[in-house]
Image (tube, rainbow, N blue to C red):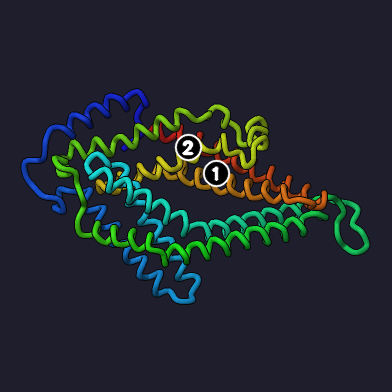
């Protein structure tokens, strides 16, 4: 399922619409070996339910709970993406509602671990900055601590980040517990349990027609190609781009310029899941690009957290300085990830 030029998307969409209106298949029934969409959705629904049971049985083990939540979110992502890809075959209202609810659940369950990961990333970066500055600083005072605004503010900056992100993590943990006990969550779990045994297709849908299913899966490649074409890949031609970093510093977290890259990351994942649904092995040549976009998202979110901490009222100038340096370093990592993506993606599409 290699990426195709964006101009092919309209032709492909015409083929999809024609295939969808060609009537139901002559033989077969959903759930048979010739029905990959049903098989994949039911497999992922079963994985969701197994992960949910593991989450309930994890007890006080933090590692077991995290592993179960990771599996639960992975299954939710796959079901959500498959509903999006093959929406024309499915009952529209049912698919739209379940997709939205799975997106809500995945976000609620992932916030706690995102906060913990963000804190670890920022504190690690702050330690490296402090140590590098300490090595360069001279002279070293009698008490053994290097001079300079970064070492002076690093400890307080770390304490501030620890306090803010730990509070955010605790709130996210409480929100996740509330969500798992809510009627809304039980409705989602019931819907997934039903999905594990029956997939609601619209009347006249053709889930057994390989041309229809293949055409819908191929549209994920065209959407991805369109989104990549909209990226400023030429600007990402260097590992560090001062102009792009300045744009990122002009707005909190650099959200305006980050959003198109996050969209490509999501579409790339949808394309991988579409390939999985059809039994295809994900293309190894696009994996480095996916990893680069993961790093991009992590660095962008960390920069946002550092910028938010720097806006805390009445913080000392050395603390604000350390947080500003930390924010700049994370934005540099954003640009480095973009450079990696544009390089490996262009290599992939040339193959």
Which residue is found at the position 88% from the left and 62% from the top?
Answer: 144
Residue receiving disc 1: 296
Whole-percent x, y for residue 276 in the image: 30, 48
The residue that appears at 25% across and 46% down in the rendered structure is: 278
The answer to which quarter of the image holds residue 219 is top left
- Residue at 16%, 53% in the rendered image: 31
Q: Which residue is mark 2?
A: 344
Whole-number angstrom distance, CA of label 1 to CA of label 2: 14 Å
Density class for disc 2 (Cα within 10 Å; few <14, some 14-19, many ≥20) is some
Quarter-wise, where is residue 283 in the image? Answer: top left
> Is residue 329 placed above or below 69 in the rendered structure?
above
Which one is earlier in the sequence, the residue at label 1 or at label 2?
1
Where is residue 80? Give x, y as percent.
Answer: 34, 49
Label 1 crowding class (10 Å Cα cut-off): few <14, some 14-19, many 20+?
A: many
The quadrant of the image that shows the N terminus is: top left
Q: Secondary structure at mark 1?
A: helix
Q: Is residue 152 above or below residue 68?
A: above
Q: Position of residue 153 (x, y in %)?
A: 80, 54
Is residue 23 among what the camera can see? yes
For the residues carrying marks 1 and 2, which lies nearer the camera in this image? 1
240 left or right, relative to 142: left
Q: Describe residue 174's horizontal placement relative to residue 350 as left or right.
A: right
Quadrant of the frame with the C terminus:
top left
User: Which residue is at a point 27% across and 41% down the rendered structure image?
Assistant: 87
Q: Position of residue 218 (x, y in %)?
A: 29, 36
In the picture, measured across the screen, residue 233 lies left or right of residue 15, that is right
Instruction: Report how many numbered discs are placed on residues in the image.
Output: 2
């Amino acid at each position: 399922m290699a990426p195709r030029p964006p101009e092919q998307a309209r032709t492909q969409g015409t083929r999809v619409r024609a295939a969808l209106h060609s009537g139901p298949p002559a033989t077969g029934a959903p759930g048979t070996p010739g029905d990959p969409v049903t098989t994949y959705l039911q497999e992922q629904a079963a994985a969701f339910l197994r992960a949910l049971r593991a989450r309930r049985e994890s007890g006080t083990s933090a590692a077991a709970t995290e592993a179960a939540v990771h599996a639960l979110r992975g299954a939710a992502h796959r079901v959500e993406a498959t509903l999006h890809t093959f929406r024309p075959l499915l009952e529209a209202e049912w698919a739209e509602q379940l997709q939205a609810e799975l997106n809500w659940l995945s976000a609620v369950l992932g916030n706690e671990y995102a906060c913990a990961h963000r804190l670890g990333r920022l504190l690690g970066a702050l330690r490296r900055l402090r140590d590098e500055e300490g090595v360069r600083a001279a002279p070293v005072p009698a008490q053994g601590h290097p001079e300079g605004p970064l070492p002076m503010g690093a400890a307080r900056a770390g304490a501030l980040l620890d306090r803010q992100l730990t509070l955010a993590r605790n709130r996210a943990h409480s929100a996740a517990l509330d969500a798992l006990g809510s009627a809304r969550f039980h409705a989602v779990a019931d819907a997934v349990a039903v999905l594990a045994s029956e997939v609601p297709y619209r009347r006249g849908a053709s889930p057994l027609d390989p041309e229809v299913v293949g055409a819908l899966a191929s549209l994920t490649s065209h959407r991805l190609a369109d989104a990549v074409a909209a990226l400023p890949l030429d600007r990402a031609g260097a590992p560090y781009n001062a102009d792009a970093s300045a744009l990122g510093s002009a707005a909190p977290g650099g959200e305006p310029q980050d959003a198109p890259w996050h969209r490509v990351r999501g579409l790339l994942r949808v394309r991988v899941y579409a390939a999985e649904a059809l039994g295809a092995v994900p293309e190894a040549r696009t994996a480095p690009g996916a990893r680069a976009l993961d790093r991009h998202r992590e660095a962008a979110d960390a920069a946002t957290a550092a910028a938010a901490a720097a806006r805390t009222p009445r913080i000392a100038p050395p603390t604000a300085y350390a947080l500003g340096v930390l924010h700049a370093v994370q934005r540099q990592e954003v640009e480095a990830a973009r450079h990696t993506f544009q390089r490996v993606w262009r290599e992939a599409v040339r193959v």
